[in-house]
Every structure is written in structure tokens, then in C-alpha cells.
Image (cartoon, rainbow, N blue to C red):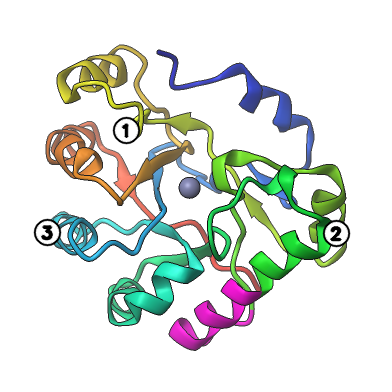
């Protein structure tokens, strides 16, 4: 298990303003926690409670369909100072769709997110990280930022939590890392109950990725 997959290193030749593979930390002591696949009625609320308890902010890449189902929860995420990102409407495999279908997945979700936080645009994170070149070109031409990650918590790998913790302790995140997690299971919550106090004690600040202008 490697939290820094080689595939991500290959994306770094793209300018960070188009495709963010690390956060804008100036001081080297900031971690950017990101949560995909919510909002989830069971797992997102306790995660928000935990973040609030530690005065931590994060970014939530939401699935449009789930925003429709749980709009009050999406409002709570934004109201508590976290940033909202676009993780498509139905979480399809993007390279199996036509470009118009891909753009429709993004635009439908943009409209829903706009209704939640009033912002014109939201950074996009493709489901499973699958990015087709035509879509990348289109998003770049619209100056629509894509937020990737630089550090994968592997919380979706179905491995036992102690094993995940051991991996994270062996290859820990560094300042400026964008940490990939998911709030549609209890794994991230269990991991963070251990990790947030550790990271805080090491002097890390947990912040949300910046909004798009
Ligand atoms: Zn996802």
C-alpha cells in the first residue's frame, strides 16, 4: 500500500492552477483534508462534529444526486466553513461517457452546489480520478480548476483500520498535501479520531482548499 501512487506524480507536470495536486500552503504546516462521495446521512454528521471539535476545516467533493437527497446536510457543511467541490452528479466512470454527458454531469452538480453555497463555480474532482483529455481541455478553457490529491489515505481499500494507520504512520503526509478521504463509510472517521490529535500535536493546521473565483 502506497499513499503516494506514481500515477499522481505524473500529473504534476500540469500547472497547479489548472489541476491542483497540492494545496497553497506557504508555511509547510498545512494539510488539506478532502472528503469524496458524500453527503452521507450517517457518516457525514459525526465527521463534521469531529472537525468542529478540533477547529479543522476541510473540502467536501459532493455527488450531485446525494446533494439532492440530503440538501440540509450539504448546507450544514458549507455553513460550518468547509468548501464544497463538484464530484459529478451520479459518480459514473467518465471515460465510458461522451464529452457532452461528462459536461452534463458536472453542470447539473454545479447548479445544485450553487443553490447550497451561492458560489458561481466549484472545483471539480473526477470520480475515481478518471480524467479524459477532451474534458481536461474543456475545463482548462473555462478556467474551471480540477482538484486532485497528493496523498491517498486508502480509506476505501477495505483494509482494517490498524493496518491503514500503520501505513499512514510509516509514510506520513507532509505540509501542503491534499489528503484523499471518503465520508461514505466510517473508516475516515475512525482514522481521523486517531490522526487529527497526532497531526495537531505535530503543529499541522487543517484547512479547506480555496474557493474558485
Ligand atoms: Zn468518488
In the image, which residues are magenta? 108-120
Secondary structure beneath label 2: helix
Secondary structure beneath label 3: helix
First reached walking from the N terminus: tag 3 or tag 1: 3
Q: Residue at x 53, y 39 (%)?
A: 149
88 sits to left or right of 103: left
Residue at which label 1 appears = 155
Which image quarter: residue 54? bottom left
| Residue 189 rendering spot, x and y as whole percentages | 18, 44
Q: Is residue 16 visible?
A: no
In this rendering, the answer to whether 72 lies above or below 208 is below
Pointer 2 with pointer 3, Cβ within 8 A: no
Q: CA distance from mark 2 to mark 1?
A: 31 Å
Q: CA distance from mark 2 to mark 3?
A: 40 Å
The 10 Å Cα crowd at callout 1, few under 14, some 14 to 19, many 20 or more, is: many
First reached walking from the N terminus: tag 2 or tag 3: 3
Residue at which label 2 appears = 138
Q: Residue at x 30, y 51 (%)?
A: 183
In front: label 2 or label 3: 2
Pointer 2 with pointer 1, Cβ within 8 A: no
46 sits to left or right of 114: left
State whether the magenta stretch is mostly helix, strand or loop. helix
First reached walking from the N terminus: tag 2 or tag 1: 2
Residue at which label 3 appears = 53
Q: Is residue 115 magenta?
A: yes
| Residue 98 rendering spot, x and y as whole percentages | 81, 55
In this rendering, the answer to whether 124 lies above or below 169 is below
Amino acid at each position: 500500500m502506497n499513499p503516494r501512487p506514481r500515477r499522481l506524480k505524473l500529473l504534476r507536470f500540469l500547472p497547479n492552477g489548472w489541476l491542483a495536486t497540492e494545496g497553497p500552503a506557504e508555511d509547510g504546516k498545512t494539510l488539506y483534508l478532502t472528503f469524496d462521495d458524500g453527503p452521507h446521512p450517517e457518516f457525514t454528521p459525526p465527521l463534521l462534529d469531529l472537525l468542529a471539535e478540533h477547529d479543522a476545516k476541510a473540502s467536501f467533493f459532493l455527488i450531485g444526486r446525494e446533494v439532492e437527497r440530503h440538501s440540509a446536510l450539504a448546507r450544514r457543511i458549507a455553513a460550518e466553513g468547509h468548501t464544497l467541490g463538484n464530484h459529478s452528479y451520479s459518480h459514473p466512470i467518465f471515460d465510458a461517457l461522451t464529452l457532452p454527458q461528462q459536461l452534463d454531469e458536472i453542470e447539473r452538480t454545479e447548479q445544485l452546489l450553487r443553490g447550497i453555497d451561492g458560489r458561481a463555480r466549484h472545483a471539480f474532482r473526477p470520480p475515481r480520478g478518471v480524467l479524459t483529455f477532451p474534458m481536461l481541455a474543456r475545463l482548462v478553457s473555462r478556467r474551471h480548476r480540477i482538484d486532485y490529491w497528493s496523498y491517498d489515505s486508502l480509506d476505501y481499500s477495505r483494509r482494517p483500520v490498524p493496518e491503514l494507520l500503520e501505513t499512514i504512520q510509516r509514510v506520513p503526509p507532509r505540509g501542503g498535501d491534499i489528503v484523499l478521504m471518503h465520508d461514505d463509510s466510517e473508516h475516515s472517521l475512525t482514522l481521523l479520531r486517531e490522526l487529527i490529535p497526532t497531526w495537531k500535536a505535530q503543529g499541522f493546521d487543517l484547512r479547506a482548499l480555496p474557493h474558485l473565483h
